[in-house]
Amino acid sequence: MKLNLPLFFGNGGKKRKEDLAYRITEISIKLKDQQDKLDEAMRRLKERDRELFDKAVRSQMNGETARATIYAQEISDIRKMMKTMYTAYLAIEKVRLKLDTVQELQGVSLVLLPVAKILGDLKEHIRGLAPEVAIALDSITSSVNSIAVETGAAVPDRTLTPALDEQARKILDEAQRTAEAKVKEMLPDLQLPHPPANVDLPSPPTSKETNKFKNRITEKDILNIIASHGNVLDINFISRQFGMDKEEVMSLLKTMAEKGLIALEE
């Protein structure tokens, strides 16, 4: 395996070195901005997790198993999102540490090649949850590749490619394991208390129980479900979970729209 590590010393070498240091620092700052965005998103998700967890506990203790199940599923989805975001946060931190190791132009290739690979993989990893961050990472990757072209690191030896892929995978895997442990540590266990023994658990609701479940879903429940699904409501989901006809769900939604609580799109 052979790497071309171009030297830029002599005439103009000092200026090139200073320019490289500035651009590397600029990239690191942009990456920190993306970490801040991910951190804020995780903070909001954590607050939402606590809110839903409390509701799930209350619903389960009151024997409202169907509603508690909905909350529990939402909590599970939120925690998956948090793990993905925290994985990205940690991977970006690894990239920034790698960039900080660039002291001399001779070592640029050894750093930029894995950095570009990691950022490219990370962009796809986070695209569905944080599109704004993914777009920023794409731009940052372009900047890294631009520097790689100028320093001669853009086209590695073919024998180096598997090693780069393996290095990127290891960093992302390590970040994922750490993220899973951290999320588990900072959030309460999903084990919910059992409902009172004298409460019958409806699963699934029979036709006789349908009206009882209809009365259990409120406008506030609808708003909570909409908020936790990115302002989108699946009518089929509500119909199944609460034993309601789709027409009844639509009737409730229209009533809420008339009150100005939601906006229905044709």
Image (cartoon, rainbow, N blue to C red):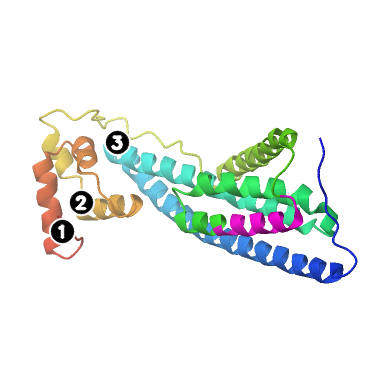
The x and y percentages for residue 244 are 14, 39
| Badge 2 density bin: few <14, some 14–19, many ≥20, Cα 10 Å | few
Please give left or right for residue 160 compared with residue 207 in the image: right
Mark before the other along the chain sequence, 2 or 1: 2
Mark before the other along the chain sequence, 3 or 2: 3
Please state which of residues 234 and 98 is positioned toward the viewer in this rendering: 98
- Picture quarter with the N terminus: top right
Q: Which residues are magenta?
A: 139-153
Q: Which mark is residue 256?
A: 1
Q: Is residue 142 magenta?
A: yes
Decide if residue 20 is in sight here: yes
The x and y percentages for residue 94 are 69, 50
Q: Residue at (88%, 69%) from the top-left corner?
A: 11
Amino acid marked by disc 3: Thr
Q: Is residue 229 magenta?
A: no
| Badge 3 density bin: few <14, some 14–19, many ≥20, Cα 10 Å | many
| Badge 1 density bin: few <14, some 14–19, many ≥20, Cα 10 Å | some
The dominant secondary structure in magenta is helix
Q: Is residue 19 above or below residue 192?
A: below
Please state which of residues 62 and 31 is positioned toward the viewer in this rendering: 31
Q: Which residue is mark 3?
A: 65
The x and y percentages for residue 40 are 52, 61
Amino acid marked by disc 1: Met
Q: Residue at (66%, 63%) from the top-left corner?
A: 27
Asked if the residue at tag 3 contacts the one at tag 1, i.e. Cβ–Cβ closer than 8 Å, the answer is no
Please state which of residues 1 and 89 is positioned toward the viewer in this rendering: 1
Q: Which residue is mark 2?
A: 218
Please give left or right for residue 19 compared with residue 41 in the image: right
Q: Secondary structure at mark 2?
A: loop
Q: Which mark is residue 122?
A: none
Q: Secondary structure at mark 1?
A: helix
Q: Secondary structure at mark 3?
A: helix
